[in-house]
Amino acid sequence: MVKKIRASVPAKVILFGEHFVVYGKRALATAINRRLAVEVSGREKGGYHVKIEDIPTFGLEMDLELGKEEGKGKGKGKALLYKDYGVATKAIAYVRESIRYLEERYGIERGGEGVEIEIKSEIPLSAGLGSSAATCVATIAALKEYFGVSGDLEGIRNDAHSIELAVQGAASPVDTAISTYGGYVSVEKGEVERLHLSELNLIIGCVGSIPLSMGMDTKRASEMGLKTKKIVEGVKTRKGIFKAIFDSIFAASDEITAQAIRTIEDGDFVKLGALMNINHGLLDAIGVVPRRLSELVKMSQESGALGAKVTGAGGLDDMGGVGSVLVLPGESGDRIKAAMEIAGALVMEVKTGGEGLKITTENAELEV
């Protein structure tokens, strides 16, 4: 048995069709050059041990040393990286379900052997960038390889999607498809098609601070960790109340996605940006755009962006408006980044079409 297995997968952004894809409409998603890795190895003590580290969050935490400094009566302080470990533990739900699923689905028996699972990530949590799917795909891939369970990429994707469904209650196949395959995919009625489209340079702005009112309220922290589930359920409820209206909105989203794919093929970025703006309006209409994300989108548009929209699940105002916006910057990238940073967002420049799942050992890469 190989001593250590490492599975690495990309983050994703949904360019068009989020939420609508859950109901069979088209969506277009792409991998970006941010990754999450799961390392699986043996350990002397039995059972599973999970370690999560290096997951970027954002905001500011001040470690203040009070008192006098050089007799001037000044306190000195140090700015530290903000980490919300309450939210970070949401990854445990996906790891736990991955283990349960694999043991039941494939009859894995560890005996007295212990297993160490370590997660390292460049993907912010609860930001709409596919951290949950990435965790599922990388964990499943690493554990299947570690325990010698044969399979292919499609099998890994199907397993990971089943785990997301079990944890969240509803999940589109977009995120797990991107985490598995990389590149671009379109999804319609649950069918995944890999596309070959040109690379795009985009800006992502993430809002990630947690409301202070959450405090030590573990119930709220748990809700925050499963934000996507709550947002998806809200859309389902509103769709049931306003069925005819939502059917029209969903049909419009489907056409926008189809046109967007042709627009990228044609290299018409002005039109692509306009379609992003329209798609954002539809997401706002179904109730998944909180005030803070809406302000980032409007700020980007006013700063010269060709297009800007919420990406992923969106957010909820009562949970701090956590989520991300996706921007096609055109020639205004520096101005847009500066405006986002002033507004307190974590800003990332990314490229689309990144590489998919990679499985390696300590010594060599394996064929998938």
Image: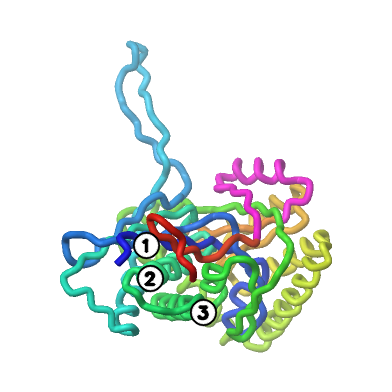
Q: Earlier in the sequence, mark 3 or mark 1?
A: 1
Of labels 2 and 3, the one closer to you: 2
Q: Is residue 255 above or below residue 33?
A: below
| Helix, strand or loop under label 3 | helix
Which quadrant: the N terminus?
Answer: bottom left
Where is residue 32? Give x, y as percent: 60, 59
Residue 12 occupies quadrant? bottom right
Where is residue 145? Give x, y as percent: 38, 70
Q: Circle 2: is it few (<14), some (14-19), or many (20+) Cα within 10 Å? A: many
Q: Camera-side residue: 154 or 290?
A: 154
Residue hosting label 2: 145
Q: Is residue 308 above or below residue 133?
A: above
Q: Are marks 1 and 2 in contact (CB under 8 Å)?
A: yes
- Residue 20 colored magenta? no
Q: Circle 3: is it few (<14), some (14-19), or many (20+) Cα within 10 Å? A: few
Could you tell me the amino acid type at mark 2?
Glu
Could you tell me the amino acid type at mark 3?
Glu
Where is residue 335? Give x, y as percent: 71, 42
Q: Are marks 2 and 3 in contact (CB under 8 Å)?
A: no
Marks 3/1: CA distance? 19 Å
Residue span colored magenta:
328-352
As drawn, is 176 to the left or to the right of 88?
A: right
Q: Earlier in the sequence, mark 1 or mark 2?
A: 1
Q: Earlier in the sequence, mark 2 or mark 3?
A: 2
As drawn, is 181 to the left or to the right of 166?
A: right
Residue 227 visible to an observer of this rendering: no
Marks 1/2: CA distance? 7 Å
Residue hosting label 3: 154
**In the rendering, which numbered label is found on residue 5?**
1
